[in-house]
Image: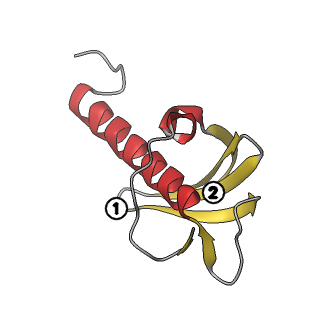
Amino acid sequence: MRRHLGSQRSSCDDARADGRSWFPGARQGDVRYASVDTRGHYLQVAIHMSTRELRIEIVESRDLMQSDGMIHKKAVAWVSNLESHIRRELGRLAAYGTSGAP
C-alpha cells in the first residue's frame, strides 16, 4: 500500500524502524541527516531543528515505491516514530537537563 507523503501518519508495529534503529549522518547547520536500512528497505531523512520547529522530510528511499509524491505506508510510519522519539528525548532533556538524570 502506498500513501501520499503529506497524508496523515500511521503507527507502526515494526520495532526495527523505530527511533532506536536510525543511524545519524551528516550535519549541515540546523539540518541533521539520519537513515534506516531494514531488510533491504532504505530511507534517509533530513531533520530540520530549531528552537521553534522540528520538521522531518524524506530525502532518499530505496525499495519503498517512492514516486510522484507517494511512498509506502511503512516509510511514513517510520518517520512518525522517529519524530515521536526525538520529541520524547527533547522533553526528557528539558525536564532533567542535559545530564539525563532526575
Taking 7 as reference, is 27 above or below it? above
x and y, in percent, of residue 44 in the image: 68, 54
Q: Residue furthest front?
A: 1
Q: In this figure, which residue is indicated by the disc labeled 1? A: 52
Taking 75 as reference, is 71 above or below it? below
In three-dimensional space, the C-alpha distance between marks 2 and 1, rounded to whole angstroms, equals: 19 Å
Task: Tell me if mark 1 has few (under 14), some (14-19) or many (20+) residues whose alpha carbon lies within 10 angstroms of its own.
Answer: few
Q: Amino acid at mark 1?
A: Arg
73 left or right of 96 in image: right
Taking 13 as reference, is 21 above or below it? above
Q: Residue at x 35, y 40 (%)?
A: 90
Q: Amino acid at mark 2?
A: Val
Q: In this figure, which residue is indicated by the disc labeled 2? A: 45
Q: Residue at x 34, y 61 (%)?
A: 52
x and y, in percent, of residue 17 in the image: 56, 41
Q: Considering the image in quadrants, where does the N terminus appear? A: bottom right
Q: Residue at x 71, y 68 (%)?
A: 65
Say which element carries label 2. Answer: strand
Residue 29 seen in the figure = no
Q: Residue at x 32, y 32 (%)?
A: 93
Disc with the residue nearer the chain's start (2 vs 1)? 2
Residue 49 seen in the figure = yes
